[in-house]
Image (cartoon, rainbow, N blue to C red):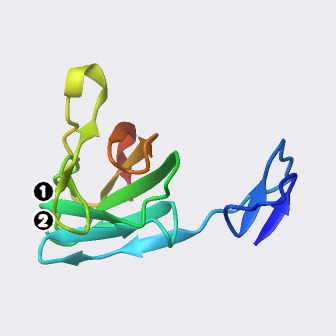
């Protein structure tokens, strides 16, 4: 572990102070559907691609950071389209539900069902993944 501005780093790189960079690149991980469940491993990336080749009944969120964090999922309907994605059903590794809060008093967005279209959603937690706040970044983008 390396600390900048701290003698007790809490991560591989822990900067206690202002950070200035010229370019930041973020990892992108491809998600898969297994038995209508998608596992999102937040130790691998914070940006995810999901090709909707089947319906998704829930998302299992694993390895949530202990502090505030966020992640983004781009969901692409395949050439068939019409896949149902339950973007509001998050669970932990033990199968317990995790609340997802949406703007507008909890209005859950409807995933674009059209073939070859993309939706993008970002989720934010302030409590280590016990609760998530979801926002629609954009919907119905052409593949």
Image height check: is 5 above or below 83? above
Residue 11 position, x and y percent, is 67, 65
| Residue annotated with mark 1 | 84
Residue at 39% in and 49% down = 120
Question: Quadrant where the C terminus lies?
Answer: bottom left
In the image, 125 versus 35, the foreground residue is 125
Horizontal relation, residue 25 to residue 83: left or right: right
Q: Secondary structure at mark 2?
A: loop
Residue 104 position, x and y percent, is 27, 20
Cβ–Cβ under 8 Å for marks 2 and 1: yes
Question: Quadrant where the N terminus lies?
Answer: bottom right
Residue 3 seen in render: yes
Q: Residues within 10 Å of mark 1 (few under 14, many from 20)?
A: some
Residue 10 position, x and y percent, is 67, 61
Q: Distance of mark 2 from mark 1, alpha carbons?
A: 5 Å
Q: Secondary structure at mark 1?
A: loop
| Earlier sequence position, callout 2 versus callout 1 | 2
Residue at the outermost front position? 8
Residue at 50% in and 73% down = 44
- For residue 106, which numbered disc appears in the image? none
Residue at the outermost top position? 104
Image height check: is 99 above or below 96? above
Residue 79 seen in render: no
- For residue 55, which numbered disc appears in the image? 2
Q: Quadrant of residue 107?
A: top left
In the image, 74 versus 124, the foreground residue is 124
Q: Quadrant of residue 55?
A: bottom left
Horizontal relation, residue 100 to residue 42: left or right: left
Horizontal relation, residue 9 to residue 99: left or right: right
Image height check: is 140 above or below 50? above
Residue at 42% in and 45% down = 122
Q: Residues within 10 Å of mark 2 (few under 14, many from 20)?
A: some
């Amino acid at each position: 572990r390396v600390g900048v501005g701290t003698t007790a780093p809490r991560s591989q790189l822990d900067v206690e102070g202002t950070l200035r960079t010229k370019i930041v690149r973020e990892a992108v991980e491809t998600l898969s559907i297994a038995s209508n469940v998608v596992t999102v491993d937040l130790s691998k990336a914070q940006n995810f691609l999901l090709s909707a080749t089947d319906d998704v009944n829930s998302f299992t969120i694993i390895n949530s950071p202990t502090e505030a964090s966020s992640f983004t999922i781009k969901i692409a309907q395949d050439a068939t389209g019409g896949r149902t994605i339950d973007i509001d059903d998050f669970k932990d590794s033990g199968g317990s539900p995790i609340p997802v809060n949406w703007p507008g008093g909890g209005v859950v967005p409807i995933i674009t069902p059209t073939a070859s279209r993309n939706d993008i959603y970002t989720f934010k937690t302030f409590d280590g993944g016990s609760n998530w706040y979801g926002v629609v970044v954009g919907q119905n983008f052409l593949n």
